Image (cartoon, rainbow, N blue to C red):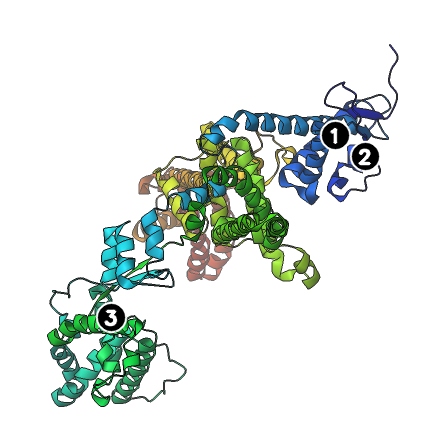
């Protein structure tokens, strides 16, 4: 069989010949920016043999990681090649290093075939699910953000849509509009007749009954007088009490609940009494300010704040019409042209409002209101006007495409451009087609506004770094890949955050800013893709804890309240296994080796581990990294403390037999030895040096035995002392004969005293 020595391989979906132009891809000369990463690097080129296989593996791994993160748009370029392969187009891939052997061209061919077949499988699945689409089942391939938006506007009821447009009468008078609302909901009609209104998406409705609860004691004049009397005296307290109560009510607001009022009045009284500051004013407070001056200054601040808060109070109260009409100043008679139908209706409306407002003034009560924030129902109202087929087309075709473009960073104007063009083409077909195109544009615009209000969609649209990180998590297909992606995201974002302030301005303009802690929280708490298992979701959420949350989780791990992940448990098992050494010193060395292994790759260690501790440790969440490190440090400190205690015990055992000699016993021993040596000298016997040393040693041993010190002194020291004694006695004896001849006895006593004084060294002997 003839061997193919060409440098080209061909990727085609089947052997069928189609009248479609082929495509050429030279890996050495790639001009398409999205495919630039397909060019092999210098370290990925090697001759035949084991080195070539390793280079191809490194090349395929790099392309796989770049495809996942869409580095330099590689995924987009591969999708284009996959579409050409799926459509039957022939793709010729050439590489300069092939020469009949497997090389980078074969790796690219396999990647193109994999992408093309995956696209074909997805299309076949979409075709098979088409009948389910007609039955309006859930979307199988839509992302979670699309599903959430669809559920949002499909779950809005008719009553909620009417409530949002409560005052939209569409030309109906008050009675007719009330009847129209009653046809859908008696509750909404009741709200309308009681004077409810909708302002800026907030439903404001008067309460049915005035509050029957007892007024708060803290908001009464009597309480104000009681609190202020201790500061100002009773007379001035009575004068200021109405002002304090009025200021508190205005600051709390007309619709404030009891808890809010209690907090506001406690805050005011605390500021007046000097226990707290109303507003932080350290820069403006004089150093020599008296209590009276402080009270007046705080009272002025409270008055200013009450004035500002009253200006912010919503103007949605009932206003008595008669207070605005000065009927008493106008003639009672009306001209005939004023008795039109509109004026009669307005007069009736004014009279109705006047009669409703009278009991309030008569009773002297305060009208209370309830405020309820309503959801935006514009998208739901537009969807309710569509037919079933049209709504299905939006849900299963258009909305997923809009979300895909929106989350890829495509500007909203670009997304809406086709809908705007449809209006132009629809105008040529007729008014009906034009109006349908306008409705489509309205719905698409409303949908985009709705999605951009959601944090995840908004971050994906505007933040390129968030979009890339989210893609890395979505492309993970196993728990290990989730851990790899999450740890890489954490490490890369933290590294960029530390270096961000030092980057040049030109590089900052070209580099997306690092994610904040809030954005990282959104990233790891997003709805998981459909292919995620529960273990993959748990692994992703474990990287959420940082700062105080991570410390809290670490403390729980240390206390054993929660179980560590399998990776952290693997490291802990390796750490605890090192305690099984025969000697504590060996266990301590093994524990120190564990700590070194956490920051050093396994290949760089002198003594290898069974697995790479640093790689596993690097991928752990912050809380579990702290947990593993703290356990290792505690084990190391415990072993060091144990070794130190053992050393102390051995020293005590060595020093235990040594006893200190009391001074009285030593003095008796000294006098006795002195007496014996004097008797030996006075005997006048002639001894040579060796015999004198032996006699002195015997005398010393006998004296030690009689005094109870035998066996307590160092042997070598005793020999040295006896030799010094014998030398001293010999010199004393020679001088004694001379002194006797002169009749000078005291000299002998003084010489002998100096000689015997050397026995003081025995104190050092027993102190050893």
Q: Are marks 3 and 1 in contact (CB under 8 Å)?
A: no
Of labels 3 and 1, the one closer to you: 3
Residue under pointer 2? 27
**Mark sitting on residue 233:** none
Residue 95 quadrant = top right
Query: Of the residues under marks 2 and 3, which one precedes in the sequence?
Result: 2
* Residue 293 coordinates in the image, percent (x, y): 28, 89
Image position of 432 (left or right of 307): right
Q: Rounded to the nearest whole Å, what is the CA distance between mark 3 and mark 1?
A: 79 Å
Disc 1 secondary structure class: helix
Figure check: 56 above or below 513? above
Residue under pointer 3? 349
Q: Camera-side residue: 412 or 519?
A: 412
* Residue 171 coordinates in the image, percent (x, y): 36, 62
Q: Rounded to the nearest whole Å, what is the CA distance between mark 2 and mark 3?
A: 82 Å
Figure check: 343 above or below 334? above
Quarter of the image for the N terminus: give it.
top right
**Mark sitting on residue 108:** 1
């Amino acid at each position: 069989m003839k061997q193919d020595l060409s440098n080209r391989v061909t990727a085609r979906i089947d052997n069928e010949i189609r009248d479609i132009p082929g495509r050429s891809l030279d890996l050495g000369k790639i001009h398409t920016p999205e495919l630039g990463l397909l060019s092999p690097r210098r370290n990925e080129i090697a001759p035949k043999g084991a080195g070539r296989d390793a280079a191809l593996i490194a090349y395929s791994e790099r392309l796989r990681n770049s495809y996942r993160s869409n580095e330099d748009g590689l995924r987009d370029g591969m999708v284009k090649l996959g579409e050409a392969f799926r459509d039957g187009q022939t793709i010729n891939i050439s590489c300069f290093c092939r020469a009949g052997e497997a090389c980078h061209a074969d790796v690219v061919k396999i990647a193109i075939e994999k992408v093309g077949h995956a696209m074909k499988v997805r299309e076949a699945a979409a075709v098979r699910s088409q009948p389910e689409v007609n039955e309006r089942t859930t979307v199988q391939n839509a992302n979670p953000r699309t599903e959430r938006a669809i559920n949002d506007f499909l779950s809005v009821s008719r009553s909620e849509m009417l409530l949002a447009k409560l005052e939209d009468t569409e030309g109906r008078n008050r009675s007719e509009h009330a009847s129209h609302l009653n046809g859908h909901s008696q509750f909404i009609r009741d709200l309308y007749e009681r004077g409810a209104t909708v302002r800026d998406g907030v439903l404001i409705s008067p309460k049915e009954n005035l509050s029957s609860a007892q007024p708060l004691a803290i908001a009464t004049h009597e309480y104000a007088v009681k609190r202020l009397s201790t500061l100002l005296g009773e007379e001035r307290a009575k004068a200021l009490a109405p002002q304090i109560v009025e200021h508190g009510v205005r600051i709390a607001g007309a619709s404030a609940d009891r808890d809010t009022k209690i907090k506001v009045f406690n805050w005011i009284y605390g500021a007046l009494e000097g226990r707290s500051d109303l507003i932080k004013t350290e820069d403006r407070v004089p150093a020599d300010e008296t209590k009276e001056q402080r009270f007046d200054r705080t009272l002025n601040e409270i008055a200013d704040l009450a004035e500002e808060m009253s200006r912010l109070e919503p103007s949605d109260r009932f206003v008595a019409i008669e207070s605005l009409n000065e009927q008493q100043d106008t003639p009672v008679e009306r001209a005939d042209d004023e008795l039109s139908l509109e004026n009669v209706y307005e007069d009736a409306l004014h009279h109705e409002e006047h009669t409703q407002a009278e009991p309030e003034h008569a009773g002297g009560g305060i009208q209370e209101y309830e405020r309820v924030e309503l959801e935006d129902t514009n998208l739901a109202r537009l969807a309710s006007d569509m037919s079933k087929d049209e709504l299905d087309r939006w849900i299963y075709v258009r909305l997923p495409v809009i979300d895909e473009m929106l989350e890829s960073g495509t500007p909203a104007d670009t997304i809406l451009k086709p809908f705007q063009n449809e209006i132009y083409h629809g105008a040529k077909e007729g008014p009906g087609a034009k109006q349908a195109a306008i409705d489509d544009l309205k719905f698409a615009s409303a949908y985009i506004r709705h999605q951009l209000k959601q944090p995840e969609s908004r971050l994906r649209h505007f933040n390129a770094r968030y979009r890339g990180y989210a893609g890395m998590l979505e492309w993970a297909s196993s728990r290990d890949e989730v851990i790899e992606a999450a740890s890489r995201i954490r490490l890369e974002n933290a590294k960029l955050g530390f270096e961000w302030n030092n980057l040049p301005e030109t590089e900052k303009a070209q580099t997306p800013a690092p994610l904040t802690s809030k954005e990282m929280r959104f990233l790891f708490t997003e709805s998981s893709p459909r292919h995620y298992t529960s273990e993959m979701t748990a692994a992703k959420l474990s990287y959420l804890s940082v700062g105080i949350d991570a410390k809290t989780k670490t403390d729980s791990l240390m206390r054993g309240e929660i179980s560590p992940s399998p990776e952290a448990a693997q490291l802990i098992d390796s750490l605890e296994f090192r305690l099984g050494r025969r000697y504590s010193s060996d266990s301590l060395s093994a524990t120190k080796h564990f700590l070194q292994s956490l920051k050093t790759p396994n290949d760089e260690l002198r003594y290898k581990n069974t697995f790479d501790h640093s790689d596993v440790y690097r991928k752990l969440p912050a809380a579990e990294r702290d947990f593993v490190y703290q356990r290792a440090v505690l084990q190391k400190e415990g072993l060091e403390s144990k070794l130190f205690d053992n050393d102390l015990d051995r020293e005590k055992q060595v020093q235990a037999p040594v006893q200190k000699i009391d001074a009285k016993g030593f003095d008796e021993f000294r006098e006795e030895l002195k007496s014996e040596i004097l008797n030996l000298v006075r005997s006048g016997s002639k001894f040579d040096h060796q015999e004198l040393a032996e006699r002195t040693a015997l005398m010393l041993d006998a004296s030690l035995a009689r005094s109870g010190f035998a066996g307590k002194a160092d042997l070598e020291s005793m020999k040295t002392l006896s030799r010094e004694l014998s030398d001293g006695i010999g010199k004393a004896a020679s001088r004694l004969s001379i002194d006797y001849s002169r009749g000078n006895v005291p000299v002998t006593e003084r010489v002998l005293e100096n000689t015997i004084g050397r026995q003081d060294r025995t104190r050092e002997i027993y102190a050893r």
